Image (cartoon, helix red, strand yellow):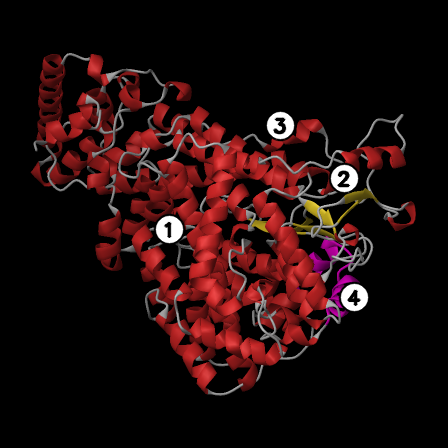
Amino acid sequence: MTLFNRLKGRGCSVLVVWALAGCPEEIVTQSSQKDSGPAEAGAAAVNPAAVNPAARAAAAVDAAARLAALEAELVAKHGEPQRPRIKQGLGQVAALWRGEDGDLGEFARAQFQADPAALQATFDRLEAALEQLDGHYNEITRELRRPSDVDIGPQWPVDALLGSMDAAAHALEDLFISKVAFVALLNFPQTSLGQRLTEGSRWTREQWAAARLTGRFVRRVPGPVQQRIATAAAAGERYINGYNLWMHHLLDPQGVRLFRKGLRLISHWNLRDEIRGDYAEREGLFKQRLIARVMQHIVQQTIPAVVIDNPRLDWNPFTGTVTPCPPEEIEADAPPPRATATTTTTATAAAMAAGASREPDTRYALLLDNFRAQRQADPYSPATPTLIARSFELGREIPEKRVVELLTELCASPLAKRVGERIEQRLGRKLEPHDLWYNGFLPRGRFSEAELDAMTARRYPSSQAFEADLPRILGQLGFAREKAKFLAEHIRVDASRGAGHALQAMRRGDFPHLRTRVEKTGMNYKGYNIAVHELGHNVEQVFSLYSVDHTLLAGVPNNAFTEALAFVFQQRDLELLGLGKPDAAADRLRVLHDFFSAWEIAGVALTEIATWHFMYEHPEATPAQLREQVVRLARETWNRYYEPVLGGRDTLLLGIYSHMIQNTLYLPDYPLGHLIAFQIEEHLAKQPAGSLGKEFERMASYGAVTPDLWLVHATGAPLSTAPLLLATQAALAAGP
């Protein structure tokens, strides 16, 4: 098939047709958004079938001839040695140039840089300017979202609108309209994923920075599409941030209250962490079974809508009954009832209980809305025409096939059964589905949740107290005094409305923000554990911005790597509370914990990947149909990999993770992060005592290169399940 026919079949603009040997496939296949962009994105809708084929062919030949003539003109001006750069640069520009962009020849004559000094100056200007653009747009969006993300008092209706705004929604399109993006494409080479994977180890740091520069412009997504994606994501986050359950108002099969007054947990993070904490409780097993039942209702959307974040109603998830809560059992700090000022609290609760229908399929409607928003970007990325492809090939730079193979190796490992048997020995009972979140291999299993809550609340009555303690925390982790001081000065801590997150800075001079939930009684252990995890993110974010040699390389290869570095911190949370350091036996148990944690989340990730494939295969699915499919996928994955270890056929716990609703295909980063974190920990174990700070900085400041290249630099080996599986086998062989 000729190049013209290949491109014509993809609806490409005539300007894309150019005879460029060696241009990456993902660049050759870029289509003209003027011809193929969806009307709802604001692009002109043109039906390629309506264009006369003969005229189209003639126009293509003419365009190719004009492009060749322009190439010859520039070669004559700048010399034959510049031909490869001119040829590739013109092709990269032509692939995304629109008619309204003007005269391509005039632009190329003015902006192509042949002189090395001028080329370097152009690169430096672009790097500095993009850092400022990214950084300030990031700050604006952060402040617009502040009332939605941070617990600073009551929320108002306008906060939802402000939180859905993306200040940078039109930034990419503005960079193309202003032709700044085309300057980069004309003068610096784009690279394919294959090139980055096979040749990247031989590149200089400047070559890597240039690859990241042009990689920003592989797609030309219109601003309205970007804003549509941001709006859908913000709606999912608002829904999840408000998905709290008042645990004192959940009743066991006998109608007994198992949880203390005032305990308000967000789904899924706090519910899962409560299961983890209940292993040390006398009535822990009954609490865990109750929470697992609640989780199944959430996944199936059979939870009564009126009990969500409502302390005035009692709900028995075993019988399904909803009743008004006796006044003496309602928390003193409960929010006002959901009613008009003329309605009494008792009457309101009774009316709500009487109409306690299940939550509508909101969870899945929001997931579908995220899918449909992302789908609007598909036509602008012909080489990666789905969010799935972009997530793995552009975002992670790890092919989906390889990720699925890694996840399947974890899920199907026979070691899971052996680790499960070890857990049974420690618990003295058969495992149940909620033991998916067993954490008794860690030292925290020796302490009750109440003990840990009391300890953290005394130490951290507010987010400011945690921020003030950062120098000590970082020093205890192994960072030199001046380095710990520098890091603490560059991190801000906020009380989160949601479970917590780390919000990066994107320009030097700005600061990353650590968010975790802080209750009125102080930071409980769940909030503290999350805070230590997010601190790992923040320290990575400081180093990978302030210490990297090129800001175009700021960051790490993908989210799995920042998760891995955060796990390194989180694993030491009890040490930071002064509750002891691990010995050899504790190290063996840590290995079993690392394996079991990776095994747990791998099935969750496989469920999410399969869910996105279903949505792309059934784009007209209703929320109810999507719910049925997620339930089916969660059951099938459970029955295949988890039932042999934990029992509970058809369990739905793999579908509970809130990331599925408020993020897009984020969950695979967690099992990958566990694998990466284990390789990092194995490397750290071989270093002299006190080396964590120095090694962490060395790793985090290497920048956003490809995953295997980063890991080889950090640990000496590429990404693999082998280190974790071999260490797990050795830990099991060493005895209990």
The kind of residue tagged 4 is: Ala
The image shows residue 498 at horizontal and vertical percentages of: 65, 46
Looking at the image, which is closer to me, 5 or 697? 5
Residue type, mark 1 in image: Arg
**In this orientation, does residue 515 appear?**
no
Which image quadrant is residue 89 in? top left
- Amino acid type of the residue that numbered disc 3 sits on in the rendered structure: Leu
Classify mark 1: helix, strand or loop.
helix
The answer to whether residue 712 is seen in the rendering is: yes
Residue position for label 2:
153
- Distance between the Cα atoms at labels 3 and 1? 31 Å
Gap between marks 1 and 2, in whole Å? 37 Å
Relative to 248, say whether 15 is above or below: above
Mark found first going from the N terminus, 3 or 1: 3
**Residue beneath the point at 45% across and 71% down:** 416
Residue 338 location in percent, x, y?
A: 79, 33
Query: Residue under circle 4?
Result: 454
Q: Which residues are magenta?
A: 448-471
- The residue where tag 3 is placed is 161
Tell me which residue sits at (53%, 47%) in the image: 659
Q: Is residue 272 above or below residue 628?
A: below
Residue for point 18% across, 32% down: 91
Alpha carbons under labels 2 and 3: distance apart: 17 Å
Residue at image mark 1: 396
- Left or right: residue 689 versus residue 377 is right
